[in-house]
Image (spheres, rainbow, N blue to C red):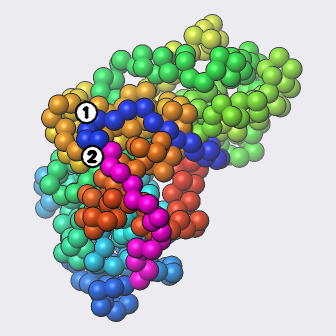
Amino acid sequence: MRKSLRLLLSLSVLIGTVGPAGVATAADTDTGSTSVTGPQSGETAEDIKDRILAIPGMTLIEEKPYAGYRFFVLNYEQPIDHARPWKGTFQQRISVLHKDTDRPTVFRTSGYGLSTTPSRAEPTRIVDGNQISMEYRFFTPSRPQPADWSKLTIWQAASDQHRIFTALKKIYGKKWLSTGASKGGMTATYYERFYPRDMDGVVAYVAPNDVVEKEDSAYDRFFANVGTKECRDRLNALQREALVRRAPLEKKYKEWAATEGATFNTIGTLDKAYEAVVLDFVWGFWQYYGEDVCDRIPDARTASDDVVYDTIDAYSGWAAYTDQGLEGYTPYYYQAATQLGSPSIRQPHLDGLSRYGYQPARNFVPREIPMKFQPQAMRDVDNWVRNNAHQMLFVYGGNDPWGSEPFHLGKGARDSYVYTAPGANHGANVAGLVDAERENATARILAWAGVPAPAVRAAQPLARFDARLDRAVDEEATREHGLRP
């Protein structure tokens, strides 16, 4: 669950579904013909900004133009503790990608910081709607001062989202869907668990579900079987070689750290950081790449020290476990160590070479921040989803490590689905599912959003693909969140 990569090669196909059968597609449908290209409800350009800023506690940070939309970056005043709102407030950043108040609205969360560049989540394109995006509490600058870390919980964050929805629902009165990828998909799921009456549907992408923190054998099975044996052996050999050559490569790492001013106080030592980056290598490869680029991994037997060092850097990133690399993600690691859980994998090919094993999330949080793991938190969410999921869609990638522990649907689930795309990585999405599941997923999203029946039957996105708006989300997920979920 960790660090920095540079690229996303996303593939997607399917594994299974729970719920009603797929819908038929309509022929000869122009995917852009039903797109709404601008305000249709009579509001002027000034009206929507004035209406948003009339919400108590809402202030404008900036407005950025984008053709066919209005894009606002805002601060919204939130209680530090929703159970005791009189105990103080903080400013939480949100953004509004405004299309039209007569369109559906998608509430997108990443579970991390907020990008201030206009972008559009896949469900937003499918329904051709508005999009509200929220910065997760405690990611800067949306951090209370002083920071009481005990107020960083999934319930508090869901309550942030509920207050934003309640405030903006008065303006955007049509149907609402929530969505997010990875930790954002987890966030959308937790929001549904605590406030099941807010949203009309949930689309959660590649959302891990670590129900029992100390039971991680599913990850071991994944890495023992993913891809071909030839590819697995190639990756494992290169990773092993990086530990065999620990002394010369750590010398290079130490020189790099001195040049960059990198320090290792949080994790403890350069040696621990070095090994943590190396142990992430295979995970990082499968999270964002795949079998089709396995031949780019050098032969460990003949690769020079420089080649081994640079290859590990390309897939894991030597900056990952420096103080500087960890600092921005303290809120994530805090949550992993208190509620979310984090995976631990055995990697038997490193026996005799690994000194620390897969390190726990606690190692990546400054020691002065107190924390205690709450095992009931994920069990509660898992039980709720199994028995109460209603109009929820989960999408996974078959070759994504994070999909090893997915959400499952039980007999109490209604109009809900779990789709997995064989061969797909952490960029799995609806567009990449096999035909029947893609059509059903698209149709359900449209139906949940309340669009007219002919569009639901056509099961096609209502807005045309926009390279700037629709690729920005994928780029953010790869570069910004790295090997974390």
Q: CA distance from mark 2 to mark 1?
A: 10 Å
Residue 33 counted in the magenta span = yes
Identify the image quadrant of residue 291.
top right
Q: Is residue 29 left or right of residue 204?
A: right
The picture places residue 67, in percent across and down from the top left corner, at 51, 81
Mark 2, residue position:
392
Reply above or below: 86 against 2.
Answer: below
Give the mark, 2 or 1, whose residue is nearer the N terminus. Answer: 2
Quadrant into which the C terminus falls: top left
Instruction: Using the rendered image of the protein, determine whether residue 379 is visible from the camera's viewpoint.
Output: yes
The picture places residue 15, in percent across and down from the top left corner, at 43, 32
The picture places residue 38, in percent across and down from the top left corner, at 41, 83
Reply above or below: 180 against 281.
Answer: below
State whether the magenta stretch is mostly helix, strand or loop.
loop
| Label 2 Cα neighbours within 10 Å, binned few <14 / some 14-19 / many ≥20 | many
Q: Check whether the beta carbons of the residues at disc 2 and disc 1 lie within 8 A of each other.
A: yes
Instruction: In this rendered view, identify the residue nearer to me: 191 or 370.
Output: 191
Reply above or below: 75 against 390.
Answer: below
Q: Is residue 151 left or right of residue 228?
A: left
Question: Disc number at residue 409?
Answer: 1
Count the labels in the image.
2
Residue occupying the point 28% across, 77% down: 102
Instruction: In this rendered view, identify the residue nearer to me: 81 or 377.
Output: 377
Circle 1 SS class: loop
Residue occupying the point 46% across, 30% down: 363
Kindly identify the amino acid type of the residue bearing the numbered disc 2.
Met
The picture places residue 245, in percent across and down from the top left corner, at 76, 19
Magenta-highlighted residues: 22-38
Residue occupying the point 34% across, 23% down: 213
Kindly identify the amino acid type of the residue bearing the numbered disc 1.
Leu
Instruction: In this rendered view, identify the residue nearer to me: 112 or 382.
Output: 382
